[in-house]
Image (cartoon, rainbow, N blue to C red):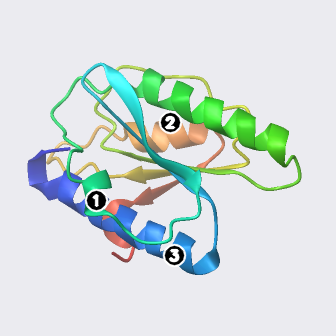
Amino acid sequence: MLAHDQLALAKGLLIALFDRARSERVEVALICFGGAQAELRFGPAVPRWWNERWLEPIAGGGGTPLEAGIARASQLLDAAARRDPARERHLWLFSDGRTTQWPARPRHADHITVVDCEAADVRLGRCRTLAQAWQGECIEAAALPA
């Protein structure tokens, strides 16, 4: 995610999504994963303002623990399903697909969107493959309004 300013693009898109969630009064959570851990940085809650401290520490650089990140997201989705089974739950995964981990589809994610941040000259296409395996959609990061 460090090459080709992919991480900066992803952070800009996150700000836009949080602004949209705030205006629509939608509950969101932000899970960041890198190194060997997954960390809940925000929520689940309706964002009332944007705080750059949520994004500033997000780093890139390989070794993405995708399984840990998806496991943490699954826990939040499971809790949300217990609280309000009728509410739809969405999972947005921002990735360049440069991981060897392929976790199972989160059980309580009604809609999954994989945002493909891959910008390498030789594209691996793993984000699209993962989205298809999870019966979700794959969107190129550059196609989203920031």
N-terminal label among 1 and 3: 1
Q: Left or right of 92: which side holds 35? A: left
In the structure shown, which secondary structural element does the residue marked by tag 1 occupy? helix
Q: Nearer the viewer, mark 3 or mark 2?
A: 3
Relative vertical location of residue 45 with respect to residue 130 in this rendering, above or below: below
Residue drawn at (55%, 70%), measured in percent from left and top? 21
The residue sitting at the bottom extreme is 23
Disc 1 from disc 3: Cα separation: 14 Å
- Asked if residue 113 shows in the view, the reply is no
Instruction: Tell me where residue 27 appears, x and y as whole percent.
Output: 63, 60
Q: Position of residue 87 (x, y in %)?
A: 81, 56
Residue 30's x, y, as percent? 45, 48
Residue at screen point 36% across, 41% down: 125
The residue tagged 1 is 11
Q: Amino acid at mark 3?
A: Arg
Q: Amino acid at mark 2?
A: Leu
- The circle drawn on residue 20 is 3
Front tag of 2 and 1: 1
Disc 3 versus disc 2: distance between alpha carbons? Answer: 26 Å
Which element is circle 2 on? Answer: helix
The crowd level at tag 3 (other Cα within 10 Å; few <14, some 14-19, many 20+) is few
Amino acid bearing label 1: Lys
Mark 2 packing: few (<14 Cα in 10 Å), some, or many (20+)?
A: some
Residues at marks 2 and 1, CA–CA distance in whole angstroms: 21 Å
* In the image, residue 57 above or below residue 98: below
* Residue at the spot of label 2: 130
